Image (spheres, rainbow, N blue to C red):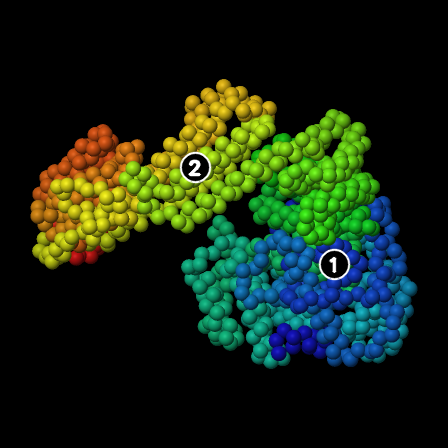
Amino acid sequence: MGIHSRRRRRHESSPGNFPPLPPPPSISIPLSPLHHLHHHRTRHQSSSGPLPPLSPPSSPPPPIPNTHHHEPKPLSSTPPTSPPPLSSRSRRDSYPGPFPSFLSPSSSDPPIFHTRNETCPGPFFDTHHHEESDPSTSYVDHYNCTNKRTLERYYHEQEHNLVWPFHKLNVHGIEHDDIRETAYEIFFTACRSSPGFGGRNAITFYSKHESNNGNEGKGSSVPVSHTSRVKRALGLKMLRSSLTQRITMSGGGGGSGGGGGSWSSAPCSPLSRGVTSPGKSPRQMTMADVMRVQMLVSEQSDSRLRKTLMRTLVGQLGRQAETTILPLELLRHLKPSEFNDLHEYHLWQKRQLKILEAGILLHPSIPVEKTNTFAINISDAIRDAEAKPLDTGKNSDTMRTFSNSVVSLAMRSPNGAPTNICHWANGYPVNVHLYMSLLQSIFDLNDETSVLDEVDELLDLMKKTWSTLGIDRPIHNVCFTWLLFQQYVVTGQIEPDLLCATHAMLNEVANDAKKEKQSLYVKMLTSVLNSLQGWADKRLLTYHDYFRGGGIRQIENILPLVLAATKILGYVTNLEGGLQEKGDKSILDSSGDRVDDYIRSSMKNAFEKIMEASNAKFEFETEKDTSEVMRKLAQETEDLAMNERYNYSPILKKWHTTASAIAALTLNNCFGDVLSKYLSEMSSLKVDVIQVLQRAKNLEDVLVQMVVENSADCEDGGKTVVREMVPYEVDSTILNLMRKWIDESLHKGAEYLQRAKETETWNPKSKSEPYGKSVVELMNKAKIMVQEFFQIPTEISEDLVQELAGGLEKIFSEYIMFVAACGLKENYVPSLPPLTRCYKDSKLQKLLKIASPCSVSCEEPHILGIEVDNHPHSCTSRGTQRLYIRLNTLHYLLSHISSLDKSLTLNPGVVPSKRRGLTNNQRAKGNNNGNSYYESANSSILAACKHVSEVASYRLIFLDSNFYFYDGLYVGDVASTRINHALKILKHNIKLMTAILTERAHALAVKEVMKASFDAFLMVLLAGGTSRAFNESDYNIIQEDFENLKHIFMEGVVAENVVEKEGEVVEGVIALMGMSTEQLMENLSIVTNETNGVGIIGNGHKLPMPPTTGKWNRTDPNTLLRVLCYRNDKATNHFLKRTFHIPKR
């Protein structure tokens, strides 16, 4: 059972007879769908006249239009469409005329833009013999076939390249069938007071063609509208027979049901069984019947809906639909006994719950918090209903809670004021999905490209759902525009009238866009236009692939559509940016630029394809084969230019006066690029090369002639286009050969760099060469390359020098990155231990590890064999010493790049470039100010030096000397674990470092060691872990130790003022350690409250925990807290416990 079982039984039940309702209001004759242009409405205001529609998730059409429908694709959940048309069916001719403009609603006799064929071209009347369908299965066949075509059509976006512009529903398990059935329920409820939906007298609808049938006498007394105003305004043809007539005819033409014609699609004949009975005359179709057929709703479902509305809304005919939470009412009143089985009821119930979840929880019009009690109740009920049906009885506490929660959330207003409007289906995108499903019903199920003649009545009825769905006229116009365009795409692009109708609707949308400023409307409009534009751009950017032969004329229909969309999009974009005063001129001017882009892109694509086809025919074993391909490519390029000139350019010229010239320019430059590559691959000038150049010259003459002819009427005579054309100069051969040499030389340099990366160990050759071996070889190769370059016996321009220098700089930059790839300083800094409080009676861990010899001993200490007397063993590891070698390597590279730059800049054989306009004096001046060619590389080297110095320093302090600094300083007792021993180790390490490093690296390296030492000292004081505790009396010892630490660096190469500045933060923290406990607690409270914007909090109140920023200073709340955490007294312990609940050790 389930969905398929429901479909199987749609023909088995009938709505039946209903009790009479109060007389419904009369239905006015629908106005023009464009009436809203003159009467702007807000979203919930009603309006006179029907409106145009839209459609559900789209899928793109095939790239090249054809006259056949696609083969069936796998099923997917999308709106229903018709089964494939008969093979004998003939298509209507494409509309050749201009796009129609909408008529004023007051126009009584509007002009006809083009003539519709009066004969029915679609498969409405069967010309072949069909066996009579089994009544029990024919409707099922029709439904499955129709729905399958629809599903397979909408979810193939990759095939059609058409992106669904509206957001998808974020509801698990909801399908389009659920949306469609709910949309019908909303529609029926909104129209329940209209004739045919339960009213006392159902209005019947007659086609203008019915006078020719055997039922002539039955409908002649009712006024007939011979044309649809919507279709007339959109330029759409009237069908030969209306849907109501076809369905009536399919059931039988007379009292016996035996004559009067037949419907061509046999599976559709059961539709008439809803309005006829065997042996009786068929009753006329109402709009309720039409909508039920179009929405593919079974009679059983329709009957349940009618009966439920009669039970729940009896006596409330005037009650507005937007005051009813329809799914909740259906859940309350429909019982399992009214379904075929419990499984079918469960599926139906889950659909109602999913719709409520989507409209109230996931996509509400008024946002709802996830923690909202009502939202939680609804979510719990929906989750519980997944396994078994929800008990909806009157005495069910679950249902009572669920109903109250739904009503509470649905009856809210944005400002909190009471309201009787239910907000359960008007949130975006739920409302758009539901409305799109309704609008899709205007298309004929048996001819997907045709709009029903009853479209005026259908749209007029659909408008009654606006207040429930939160739709207004501008949003409707956007949706309807998208629907028409989407239908054109997904039906294979075989009906240009749909494209004309889309363009007509865009005119309406353009007027709305100038008035409507609502953010949701702008968002929807932008998304729709972007999707439309994206689909069209894909085809127009490669129009040679999509439009060929007779299909070339389709460009005339698509191009104005995308330009109109671009104009609206540009206006909306300018409006959002506050540029509306700049006028439409700039937007209009951009249309020519857009066509220009289409021409250039498509010509380039077509050229690339003929080039690929030419290359595929040759194996390119010799240079002669390459030359043959070049000659053939030149001929085919000329043929492509002629095809463009005589077939495409006459059409494109309507929007771009120099279309042919732009096409010629594009081909000229495309072939020029290939020609340049060909010449660069030739080792020398040969006969084949000369022949290629001659053929290229002939092609160039043809293209220039196209430009001259097409640009004769231009303001500048085509000079702008001509200036863009790149000439095919034979003299460029030598230049290309020079560039080829440069590329090959740089390639060899890159190969060596790769080998150097794999073999470099950072062990120097000797004490006199304390740098990497790779840098010496790299600079030697660069110098040889420059020498050979200037020995070439030809004029060398500065452009070539720049290319050579630029290539070398890339190699140098990559090598610099390789040298600097030594990790980060943060890798060596220990993580911060958790904060704890120490108290006066606590016993700190005094069992500390006895100091052991450093793991790095003097026995393998110095990779350069440097010996330092009268000091303990070195703690500088081999890894740290290799970092010193990296620093020396960077300084070696810096000095040799400078000399290389001088040889490039000051060489007298370089010819100044006319393009750059630099003289020898200017180049010399640039060299005096800095490296004119290698400024970027020099900056990279300096940055790399700083990085490597930082990493080496932090490794030295936090890894090599960790035992003496972070792990040993002030552990247990401050007086017995002072910094003296650590300072001896530090002095030795600095002395060893300066012995290894080149002199130019000393200052930076020592400064970084100082910073790392200060950071380690700070971590001992503020993040020393449970093995450290300080008293106020320790202040003097710590201050003296830090002064000794600073003194070490003042004796070296670091200036005293630099040391003082770097030590300010540490001295500020030490000053805090000298404060009294009460002062520290008071300062912490004040600073914490100021940081959090809170006033003074009384004693005993809890303060917020200050965050750890890592930027410690005496005014930082976290720094103050850490000083207190390591203060060993009773008052501090009590304060931390009471205020921050910090655990004790």
- Badge 2 crowding class, 10 Å Cα cut-off, few under 14, some 14 to 19, many 20 or more, is few
As helix, strand or loop, the secondary structure at mark 1 comes to loop
**Residue 644 can be seen in this image:** no
Above-or-below relation of 397 to 476: below
Instruction: Give the residue drawn at x 76%, y 52%.
Output: 498
Q: Which mark is residue 1119?
A: none
**Distance in Å between CA atoms under marks 2 and 1:** 69 Å
Position of 35 with respect to 781 (left or right) is right
As helix, strand or loop, the secondary structure at mark 2 comes to helix
Q: Amino acid at mark 2?
A: Asn
Position of 66 with respect to 975 (left or right) is right
Taking depth in this image into account, of 162 and 968 the one nearest to the observer is 968
Estimate the x, y position of residue 756 in percent, counting from the top left. Answer: 42, 46
Above-or-below relation of 213 to 757: below
Q: Which mark is residue 780?
A: 2
- Badge 1 crowding class, 10 Å Cα cut-off, few under 14, some 14 to 19, many 20 or more, is many
Estimate the x, y position of residue 435 in percent, counting from the top left. Answer: 65, 57
Taking depth in this image into account, of 678 and 127 the one nearest to the observer is 678
Q: Are marks 2 and 1 in contact (CB under 8 Å)?
A: no
**Which residue is labeled 1 in the image?**
491
Q: Nearer the viewer, mark 2 or mark 1?
A: 2
**Considering only order in the chain, which callout, 1 or 2, is on the residue closer to the N terminus?**
1
Quarter of image, res 942: top left
Estimate the x, y position of residue 353 in percent, counting from the top left. Answer: 54, 67
Estimate the x, y position of residue 1138 in percent, counting from the top left. Answer: 19, 53
Taking depth in this image into account, of 191 and 241 the one nearest to the observer is 241
Instruction: Give the residue drawn at x 41%, y 40%.
Output: 777
The quarter of the image holding the N terminus is: bottom right
Q: Amino acid at mark 1?
A: Thr
The quarter of the image holding the C terminus is: bottom left
